[in-house]
Image (spheres, helix red, strand yellow):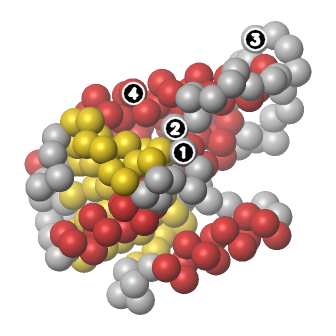
Amino acid sequence: MTRTLVFGGARSGKSAHAEQLAQASGKEVLYLATAQTGDGEMAARIAHHRAQRPAGWVTIEEPLRLGEAILREARPGRLLLVDCLTLWLTNLMFSSGETYPDVGNIALPELFHSERAHLLYALAEIEDSGCDIVLVSNEVGMGIVPYGAISRCFTDEAGRLNQAVAAVCDKAVFVAAGLPLYLKGGPC
């Protein structure tokens, strides 16, 4: 059983790399999609990702209860591919239609905190399940400091989540320009 975090910037090739890892595993692949169609542009992105997946992969859409889905779907001979953690983070931050101030401290909803903890619990719990998992996430903290309190909060929380997930994963792969750099574990 291997837990792998694949992360990088927008259009870095991280999803393609994660899908290559899943395909090469020889295991049954279950794709846990976290994206929600909010507008036409996002619908097009989701359609693009769907079209790239092999026909035999099963997709389950899970925008909020990711830890629960991982625990429910983990079994020997299967690989779970989660794409992506940062969209999931956004879903949690706005799960109850929150509006946030442009300045000041941000109070995130309780669901954000409980589901984040449940994800980390699930990743530790499946260690002996015989199920591999590949998690895709964005690295959003390598640019300028964002304008606005909620944008800064998101950047901070995404960074914290990536650190916490990388700590429990066996492998961590940074993808830039379509090239994987293994920061933890190796390519084999």
Q: Position of residue 86 (x, y in %)?
A: 56, 44
Which numbered disc covers residue 163?
A: 4
Q: Amino acid at mark 3?
A: Asn
- Whether pointer 2 and pointer 3 mark residues with C-beta atoms closer than 8 Å, the reply is no
- Whether pointer 1 and pointer 2 mark residues with C-beta atoms closer than 8 Å, the reply is yes
Q: Which residue is mark 3?
A: 105
- 108 or 152: nearer the viewer: 152
Task: State the separation of the CA atoms marked 2 and 3.
Answer: 23 Å
Q: Which callout, 4 or 1, points at the residue further toward the start of the chain?
A: 1
Task: State the separation of the CA atoms marked 4 and 2.
Answer: 11 Å
Quadrant location of residue 29?
Answer: bottom left
Q: Amino acid at mark 2?
A: Glu
Task: State the separation of the CA atoms marked 3 and 1.
Answer: 26 Å
Q: Which residue is mark 2?
A: 139
Q: Which residue is mark 1?
A: 9
Q: Amino acid at mark 4?
A: Gln
Q: Which callout, 4 or 3, points at the residue further toward the start of the chain?
A: 3
Task: State the separation of the CA atoms marked 1 and 2.
Answer: 5 Å
Q: Nearer the viewer, mark 4 or mark 1?
A: 1
